[in-house]
Each structure stands twice: as structure tokens, then as C-alpha cells.
Amino acid sequence: MNYKNELQLNINNEQESKSYTDIMELCDAYNYEIIEKKDRLCFVLRKSVFRKKIIKMIKNKDDKNKKDENKKNENKKNENKKDENKDDDNKDDDNIAIMMTGLPRFYDYSIKSIKSFSSNYKNVDYFFTFWDINGKINNHSKYKYDISNYFERNTISVSTIENIFIHFQPTMLQFLKYSEYETEIIKLSNMINVPGSSRYGHETYKNMVVSVSLINHIGYKSLEEILTVKKFNYFFKIRPDSIINDHVDLKLFNNNLITPLSNSHNLYIDNVKFSMNDQICFTDNFNYLSIYCNLYENLIEVYKLIHNIKGEEPQKYFHESLIGYFIRIMNKMNVKEIPIQTGLVRENKILFYYKDKWSGPKIMTYEEYEKMIK
């Protein structure tokens, strides 16, 4: 059932009718169309060259037979695509895909920094996949409150959606209904055992690790399915609560996975550092992005191997340690840590990381941060 049909069905409910009209007017104003499925709500830029591919991808989500058939056909294409992305001789105009996944907390504040950072580059396409907590976006027909309450408090607002449209014009902006994945997340979380009484073995933290890994995987798979339409030379993966006050030279990539040195902790096994920053990564190798976003399907094995590392507790159960062990030890990927000025936005404060140190952040207020960057 599409939005226009639902609008007609709810015409007698003044509050709901107003809400639908606001959303549709917003999309019309910024040239987006809405696709709604059981597990997600997707905003697609109408003028994008990816439009038909994205719509087909989203609409096929409920058809497992089509999905399986498409997967077989795409495998060969993707193998060719991965090889092409490694071929410097065939690069066009340094096309960049920026993938952002996660829970868009405090996004109204971080959006300025991320946009400022991405403005350093040309030919950028944005692909955003966010959690919709409590289904307030997707269950709009059952949510009988003002439009401002559609979105989870401290997560995202309709004004933020508009700001995303204004600043980024993302090719795809999708909200996944968390309740549709919650059973899967809890099931996997319950299979993870962390010895001792550390909070990193508590269900809340394990659920966080699983949900972060899952949405990275879903965001990557959505991007993978539409890459047959356009070739990209570089891929940026950014958490939506990030600030990035820096520039990364594309010449540094050279078949590496690049991450910030800051907030990477400093954990070693056999004299090899395995922990790494989990906030941001850059690469010119699509296969590296694939591996980075595939922790979800390997979490149980990673935890089992992490258990065997002597000492380093509880740090070895940090998400930064899990993703780092998977990438650096299990997959032996070439990770280059470089000084990048980053931070994380939190309620009423900024966690500002020193670019040349792996250790903890300086905590400052929004006002202090604004004064510092002027």
C-alpha cells in the first residue's frame, strides 16, 4: 500500500492526514519519492541514476525467490566490479560513495561537520541507512501524534530529514524498522558469552555490538546491489554521530583500509596491533569495505577467538577490538592508521579526540567546540 492510498484511508483523522501531507510535501519539495516495505521506509532521489535500481531492490525485499535469483545474477557482476575498482587505469573522475549507517543520534549537530568534510571532494554520492527505533517512522498510520513525534527523541526529527535533503541530497536514505530485526539481534546476542561480570558482557552492550554490525551489513548490501549502475573509485564509511575536522588525501589510499589513529585503543596480540577505530574508514578497494561490513556474519567466531587472548580485559571485548581483530588478524587486511581530527557528538558535549593519539578524548561543551574551530 503506498502513501497516497494511506492518505485517503486516513482522511478522517486530521492529525494523521496533516502528518502525511507534511512528509509528502517535503519529498515533493526536494524531489524525493517514498518506498515503504515491511521492514523499512526509503527515500529515493528522483533524478538519481540509481533510482530504478533502488526501487527494484526495495520492492524485491519481500520476494525471496526473486532475491535468490537476483543474487546469483549479481555475483558475477560484483566479481567483475571488484576487479574494476582495483584497476587504476580505468578510473574515471574519482567517484566517491559515502555510506553512513547507524543510529543518527544528535545528527542535527554532526551534520555540519560531516558535510564540511565531504565538501572537500567532488563527485560524491551518499547512501544512508539508519535505525528507526520503535518503528515511529514506519508505523506512522498507527502513531496518532503530532508530526514532531514521528521520530525517536534524541534520534532524528523531520527537520533533520529536511537538513539531510538540503545538505547532502542523498541518493538513498532508508530507515530500518528496528522491531523487525529485534528478535534476530537478541537471538545472536544471547549466543555470545563473555566471561566475568564486565558490562561488555551485559545484554545491552552485546545488543549494541550486534545491531551495529547488522546495520553495517545491511547498508553495505544495499550499496552493493546498486553499484552495477555506476562505478566508484573510493568508499567512505562514517558513523552519523561523528565530527571530522580534517581532510584525507585520496593519494594515501593505494589499496589500503584507512582509519583514524585516534580512539583506536592500543591492544596487541603477538606484537601485532589488532584494535582499531570503529568510527570511520576509507578505502579504494570495494572488497575491503565488504569485509569491514561483514563482521555480523562472523561475530560468534570472533568472540570465541577473542576469549583466547590472554589479559587485555575488558578492553578486548570493546567493539573497536572485535572489528579490529576480524579485519587485521582474521582477514589480514592492510590497515593504515593516520592522524585524522575526529570526535563524537553526545548530549550537551563533544568527545574530541586528539588526532595523533590513540588514547581517550577531551570532553568539551558544544560552545567550547564551536569556539575552538572558528
Image (cartoon, rainbow, N blue to C red):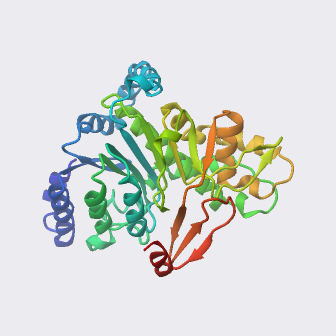
| Image quadrant containing the C terminus | bottom left
Query: In the drawing, does residue 248 fall left or right of residue 268?
Result: left
Q: Position of residue 148 (x, y in %)?
A: 30, 73
Query: In the drawing, does residue 167 fall left or right of residue 221?
Result: left
- The front one of 243 and 189 is 243
Res 359 → quadrant:
bottom right
Q: Position of residue 231 (x, y in %)?
A: 35, 31
Q: Position of residue 344 (x, y in %)?
A: 53, 65
- The residue shown at (35%, 47%) is 126
Q: Position of residue 196 (x, y in %)?
A: 82, 59
Q: Is residue 226 above or below residue 345?
A: above
Q: Is residue 194 above or below residue 255?
A: below
- The front one of 81 and 123 is 123
Q: Does residue 81 appear in this view?
A: no
- The front one of 169 and 121 is 121
Query: In the drawing, does residue 170 fall left or right of residue 204?
Result: left
Res 59 → quadrant:
top left
- The residue shown at (48%, 35%) is 284
**Can you name the residue that lies furthest to the right here?**
310
Report the number of numbered marks.
0
- The front one of 96 and 11 is 96
Q: Is residue 7 above or below residue 275?
A: below
